[in-house]
Image (tube, rainbow, N blue to C red):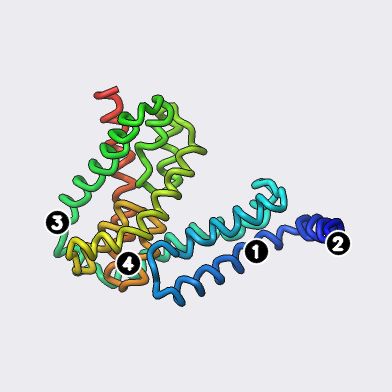
């Protein structure tokens, strides 16, 4: 019986649609569990989906390259999804314009804090320079962070893992922390989530309100730009 199951899996794994279907089913299952658990932060759908998919790939001995042949269809949709974030931003443009000064101050503070806290933690743990470079842009969106790491001599693949981990943790624990700090303003909550945890945090902010989602999407884009400018300067001056 196990041999038959193995043969069936090998046959199905040859189709790229298997990875796509598996990912979609895992996300739907994770979303169902998330809602039934009362939107518990630690059961963030993205985190649970990653765990489920990795578990299946590990148990079946499926390589990431094989999996990505099907999952690349979802990856392709990241571009249009990011562009679509302009819609809630456009609707909230008046609020964004009125908060321009606060946005500028928050962006500079948030970007510097994200970079320096990551580097400080890495130095505390005695990380090597390559690991520090990979860790420093963790709060920028993945393509930008990987590009920065590559230009500074780091490993883009390691940066990608750290960016995803940051996004998942930020989306899961960020709203809880903001609640504990008594921060209720949707614009402030959204901007904080977007600055700290990029796209995954923005998806979480959109679940709260359109205002939070708009400010989070804005923060994600601005922080990517700020990190690309600030981090190389800091690295050149300090290291």
- Whole-angstrom CA distance, mark 2 to mark 1, is 22 Å
Q: From the viewer's perspective, is residue 70 above or below residue 84?
A: above
Disc nearer the start of the sequence (1/4):
1
Give the mark nearest the N terminus, 3 or 4.
3
Residue named by callout 3: 102
Q: Residues within 10 Å of mark 2 (few under 14, many from 20)?
A: few
Q: Nearer the viewer, mark 3 or mark 2?
A: 2
Spot occupied by residue 71 in the image (x, y as percentages of width and height): 62, 57
The image quarter containing residue 173 is bottom left
In three-dimensional space, the C-alpha distance between marks 1 and 4, rounded to whole angstroms, equals 28 Å
Q: Find the distance from the CA under tag 3 to the CA under tag 4.
A: 17 Å
Q: Which residue is mark 4?
A: 213
Q: Position of residue 45 (x, y in %)?
A: 47, 65
> Residue 81: percent from the left, percent from the top?
46, 63
Q: Where the C terminus falls, by quadrant?
A: top left
Residue shown at 66%/50% (left/top)?
58
């Amino acid at each position: 019986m196990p041999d038959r199951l193995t043969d069936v899996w090998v046959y199905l794994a040859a189709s790229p649609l298997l990875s796509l279907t598996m990912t979609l089913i895992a996300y739907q299952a994770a979303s169902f569990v998330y809602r039934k658990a009362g939107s518990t932060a630690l059961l963030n759908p993205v985190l649970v989906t990653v765990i489920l998919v990795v578990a299946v790939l590990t148990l079946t001995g499926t390589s990431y390259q094989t999996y990505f042949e099907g999952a690349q269809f979802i990856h392709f949709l990241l571009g249009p999804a990011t562009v679509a974030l302009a819609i809630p931003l456009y609707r909230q443009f008046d609020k964004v314009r009125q908060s321009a000064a606060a946005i500028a101050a928050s962006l500079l503070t948030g970007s510097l804090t994200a970079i320096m806290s990551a580097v400080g933690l890495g130095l505390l743990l005695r990380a090597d320079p390559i690991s520090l470079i990979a860790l420093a842009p963790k709060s920028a969106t993945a393509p930008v962070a990987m590009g920065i790491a590559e230009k500074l001599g780091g490993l883009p693949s390691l940066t990608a893992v750290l960016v995803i981990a940051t996004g998942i943790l930020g989306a899961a624990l960020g709203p809880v922390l903001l609640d504990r700090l008594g921060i209720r303003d949707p614009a402030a909550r959204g901007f904080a989530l977007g600055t700290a945890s990029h796209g995954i945090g923005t998806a979480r902010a959109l679940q709260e309100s359109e205002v939070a989602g708009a400010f989070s999407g804005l923060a994600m884009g601005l922080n990517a730009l700020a990190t690309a400018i600030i981090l190389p300067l800091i690295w050149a001056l300090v290291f």
